[in-house]
Amino acid sequence: MHLLVLSQEKISNMISSTIGIWNYWIVFLLMMIGLFLVIGRKNFLKKIVGLTIFQTSVFLLYITFGKIKGGTPPILNNAIDTIYSNPLPHVLILTAIVVGVATTALGLSLVLRINSEYGSIEEDDISAQDLVDYHDQIESSKKIDKKFVQ
């Protein structure tokens, strides 16, 4: 009976320590979702959404690094033994969010331009159309070469 109580206590400690790092689990889950969308999808719009999700997971990871348990915002007070949280990761993430929004906007504008040029935002359709255009260009250059040979 004593062994059963001991193992239940170990399981309880393991579960509470696993739940205690829930933010890392969320970061990992968001990273894997974003990576899957970037690698596993052929649609450029879905790839941009995947990059944005992946980027968000990195933001959360850095914000997690900046938080200290029991730490207060870095505002000076009269107490000598105050523990402060590091504000630098939060400031850097604010800059990264602005850069991320600009990058996403640029990616979306490129997707619109690709769609207007090719009529599709699927990788396979664009590759097929480029391949056909390439072969047409080779055939037309062969006709020009034959014209000059005669």
Image: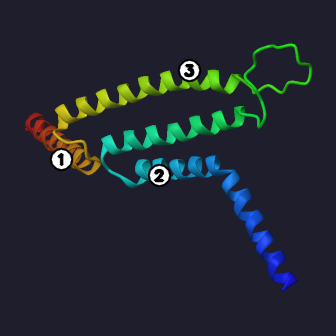
- The three-letter code of the residue at mark 2 reads Ile
- Label 2: state its secondary structure: helix
Seen from the viewer's position, the closer of residues 56 and 64 is: 64
**Distance from Cα at disc 1 to Cα at disc 2:** 34 Å
* Numbered label attached to residue 33: 2
Q: Which residue is mark 3?
A: 95
Q: Which residue is mark 1?
A: 132
Mark 1 vs mark 2, foreground winner is 2
Relative image position of residue 61 (x, y in whole percent): 63, 39
Give the mark, 3 or 1, whose residue is nearer the N terminus.
Answer: 3
- The three-letter code of the residue at mark 3 reads Thr
What residue lies at 32% left-to-right and 50% top-to-bottom? 42
Examine the rendered structure and indicate whether residue 86 appears above or below residue 52. above
Q: Quadrant of the C terminus?
A: top left
- Label 3: state its secondary structure: helix
What residue lies at 24% left-to-right and 29% top-to-bottom? 113
Mark 3 vs mark 1, foreground winner is 3
What residue lies at 51% left-to-right and 48% top-to-bottom? 30
